[in-house]
Image (cartoon, grey):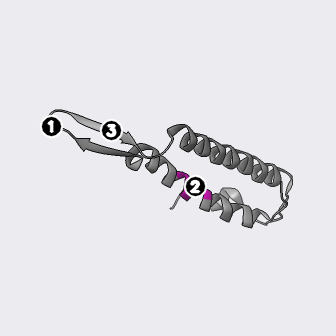
């Protein structure tokens, strides 16, 4: 796997999520062609190999899982210093 910044990985995740949504739409809606033979009989013809589309969707989902795990792992070891009174910040309005 290539090394990249967390910000770049987050941008890549966004692009992959968009692509994943496109592929899910393809799998569910536009991946077939319907021909009506009569009023009651229609023929559905697949335009894409459903197994290949599903395989690609699974690959992208696995990448997103791994990327999220890496980001969370990075966040688990990264420390930040901030001065804040949490009880004051979360206090109810008077």
Q: Position of residue 45 (x, y in %)?
A: 36, 40
Which residue is disc 1 drawn over? 38
Number of marks in the rendered image:
3
Q: Position of residue 92 (x, y in %)?
A: 54, 57
Which residue is disc 3 drawn over? 44
Q: Which secondary structure lies at badge 1?
A: loop
Q: Is residue 84 visible?
A: no
The residues bearing labels 1 and 3 have C-alpha atoms spaced at a distance of 13 Å
Q: Nearer the viewer, mark 2 or mark 1?
A: 1
Quadrant hosting residue 62: top right
Q: Is residue 79 left or right of residue 55?
A: right
Quadrant hosting residue 42: top left
Q: Which secondary structure lies at badge 2?
A: helix
Give the numbered dot on residue 17.
Answer: 2
Q: Is residue 13 visible?
A: yes
Q: Which residues are magenta?
A: 16-20
- Which of the pair 57/90 is nearer the observer? 57
Is 29 part of what is drawn in magenta?
no
Q: Residue, x 39% and y 50% (percent of image)?
A: 30
């Amino acid at each position: 796997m290539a090394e990249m910044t967390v910000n770049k990985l987050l941008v890549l995740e966004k692009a992959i999520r968009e692509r994943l949504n496109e592929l899910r739409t393809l799998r569910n809606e536009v991946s077939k062609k319907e021909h009506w033979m009569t009023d009651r009989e229609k023929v559905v013809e697949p335009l894409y190999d459903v197994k290949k589309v599903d395989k690609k969707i699974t690959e992208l989902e696995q990448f997103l899982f791994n990327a999220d795990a890496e980001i969370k792992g990075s966040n688990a070891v990264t420390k930040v210093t901030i001065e804040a009174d949490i009880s004051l910040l979360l206090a109810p309005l008077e």
